[in-house]
Image: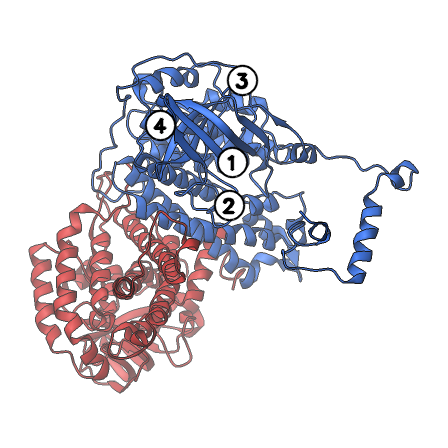
Amino acid sequence: MSLINHFRPGGKNGVPSGESRDPIGYLVAGLNRLAQSDLIDRVKLRKPAEQAVFTVTRSGFKTLTAASRTFAKQGKPSEPGVRVAAAKAKGVFDLTPTEDEQMLVDVVTEFAEEVVRPAAAEANESCEAPAELLAASLEIGLPILGVPEALGGISEERSAMAGTLVAEALAKGDLGLAVAALAPGSVATALGLWGTDAQQQTYLPAFTGDDVPAAALALNEPTVLFDVLSPSTTATRTDDGFVLNGVKTLVPRGAQAELFVVGAVLDGKPVLFLVESSTPGLAVEGDPAMGVRAASLTKLTLTDVKVPADAVLGDTEGTSYAECVRLSRLAWCALAVGTGQAVLDYVTPYVKERQAFGEPIAHRQSVAFMVANIAIELQSMRLLTYKAAARAAAGKDFSREVALARTLCAEKGMQIGNDGVQLLGGHGFVKEHPVERWYRDLRAIGIMEGSVLV
Amino acid sequence: MAINLDDPKKFRPLVGQAHQVAMNMLRPISRKYDRAEHEYPKELDMLAAMIDGLSESGASEGAGAAGVRRDEGDQDTSVKNGANLASVMSIAEMCWGDVGLLLSMPRQGLGNSAIASVANEEQHERFDGVWAGMAITEPGVGSDSANIKTTATLDGDHYVLNGEKIFVTSGDRADAIVVWATLDKDLGRAAIKSFVVAKGTPGMRVERLEHKLGIRASDTATIIFDNCRVPAENLLGSAEVDPKQGFAGAMATFDNTRPLVAAMAVGCARAALDLTRDLLAQAGVTVDYDRPALTQSAAAAKLLQMEADWEAAHLLTLQAAWMADNRQPNSLEASMAKAKAGRVGSDITLSCVELASSVGYSEAELLEKWGRDSKILDIFEGTQQIQQLIVARRILGLSSAELR
């Protein structure tokens, strides 16, 4: 890099690369350097600023990933794994969940209300889900929701609908914590859906046991206009397996994860790979984002990571990968619906209590209509998501349905987050109320790929 | 019981039939009656006879305006896909053909919905097979239908109606008109009742027919009632002025007709969407559902957004009908469906005109016509704003006095 480039303002601090400085600009830049210098702190010109936890995370750790467990190889690599049957389609238009689904939703709803919501603000600040909360999420069976009954899980048939309802109910408590709690189950579900006998026998016992590992489905990459179906991460064949290279971002709980499912291109097709965190060449660092902070988002760098030949999860034609992307998007839609419901439930009493000009602001059409539109679009999002989920569970093609759900959830979900803050005015902008967090969380819909799966 | 939002299997034959009718009967005369406003679409008589035949044979599952009645007292608790779902689905399909012609369909008027919703058994039988239009709006009264000025005064065994009604669909063609009038202006909305006035009743005359933006195949009449004597037994429902019940009874009609109007918007919008998708494909633009919209062309991204909005309107409409089929109160959902379908109907049809450029704007295609037809669907049977008001009141738990 030339000296001139070094002094250019562009390409950093959010300044477009074409910007240039005039003489006053250079003067101001120089003053800023001085202002940042430790010198003035040493002569006590400024009170030392307290460093917030999240900045430590941001600038902080870059470690080899957790290596606490070795997964002993079991089972037959050439045999297909156990698969659950598709849900039986009855052909009747129906909005009623099954009794089992309803029971599950009731349990998760209570958990979301009593455990998740109270922990949400703190978890957002610390970028970490409380250990007790994660432990409790194991107790209600979140990681094994999509694991076949025959392998110690609870799913008798395709669990996409149940998973959708659970994700929605959980996100009503908090989206970030929902992602943190659902991340391990996403990998377990993926193993249930595409794992070989050997992969299921090797990894699933850990998920169905008492000491469930953190695990993450890593599909996102730091690319503008990112297209998840064409990742930059590559897989190259070797004599006894593959070598992976690339960077994955916004990976939930990557620092604790013991098992990753990573997307990479092999022979021009996107493919899923199982990567144990103890594999040499993996590095993880904090990657906090605008929202979803409780999920301890991380950046996962893969440098010449060697994986064995049986690390491929699913097929190498791109079919399992595409299916995985769709099911993941479905889960994000469900999270959007739950968060949207949280917004509606919060603003409804607020606008009825908040007084302006001598009456509740809810008595004004401009306010009331905003609430009405939140309700209308939220139900729209829910119906589209359920339709896609029910088709997925029944084993029907749902690529169109999930694309429509995602389109609507991204657009209207953000609108709901935006209106949620607007309805509270200045009070919505401060952290005393959760609407600002929902605003940040809802921006994730339509951006996030992977991480969660139903 | 299990969640499934695919179109009910049971109605595939019905919808298929409606689609064939829409395609082969309505589309070929669609432009003809758009141009020849006020001319009676004589082709519809044969179609109406066919529909009557279908409903008598039971094959239609109660499709059409007569299908909105709810039978109380049935103890069966299994999930039903019944007459309401059948109605919205077949109406959407017919409006994929032509909204104006669907509205002109003999014996399928909104007045028939009112009769189906509020008539007693005896009236239900007596008015069976009668083609009934609906007269609510007045020159000074639109959305605030509780303020209507048309009066009904009891004189012996007749009511005497006086007043002026506008925007009466098929007002000149229908066999009868269901008229909203007040028994006593001082008693407010509870005193508003509906009356069936047969065509040719002395004192009732069609003043003029409107020239409109869209749905030009459908006649819209102004009707004057000048000391028009109507038999007392033509008052629909109870003659009693019950402040608790009264207006709610009349308004119940809307809970039943709103999903139908939403279905009209859904059908009309799908016509525009289907053609535009085809035209864009011919121009080399197709949607890849798995790829991000932002990496596709703007036209493809718009198509994806419109399809998502359309699907939302479609599913909200099915939800409202499904709830009615399963005897759940659906006033909120009916208004949600109409609000969403109404605005989405306008956005989709107008955006399709834009996407198709001059092909969309020219009368050589039907896109511009659908762009005009769709507008009324966000207005009649409760405007967009009225639907939002209803939804807001329900969600917020506010009365009409609190949220005006």
| Tag 2 near tag 4, CB within 8 Å | no
Can I make out residue A113 in this image?
A: no
- Are labels 3 and 1 on one chain? yes
State which quadrant residue B226 falls in: bottom left
Q: Mark 2 falls on what kind of element?
A: loop
Q: Can you give x and y, in whole percent of width and height, for residue A355 in the image?
A: 65, 56
Judging by the rendered image, the residue that carries numbered circle 2 is: A223
> What amino acid is at disc 3?
Ala
| Tag 3 near tag 2, CB within 8 Å | no
Judging by the rendered image, the residue that carries numbered circle 4 is: A313
Q: How far apart are marks 3 and 1 (CA)?
A: 20 Å
User: Where B4 falls versus B121 (above or below)?
Assistant: above
The numbered disc on residue A247 is 1
| Disc with the residue nearer the chain's start (1 vs 4) | 1
Number of numbered tags placed on the structure image: 4
| Disc with the residue nearer the chain's start (3 vs 2) | 3
In this rendered view, identify the residue nearer to me: A133 or B283. B283
- Name the image colouring: by chain
Q: Distance between the residues labelled 1 and 4?
A: 19 Å
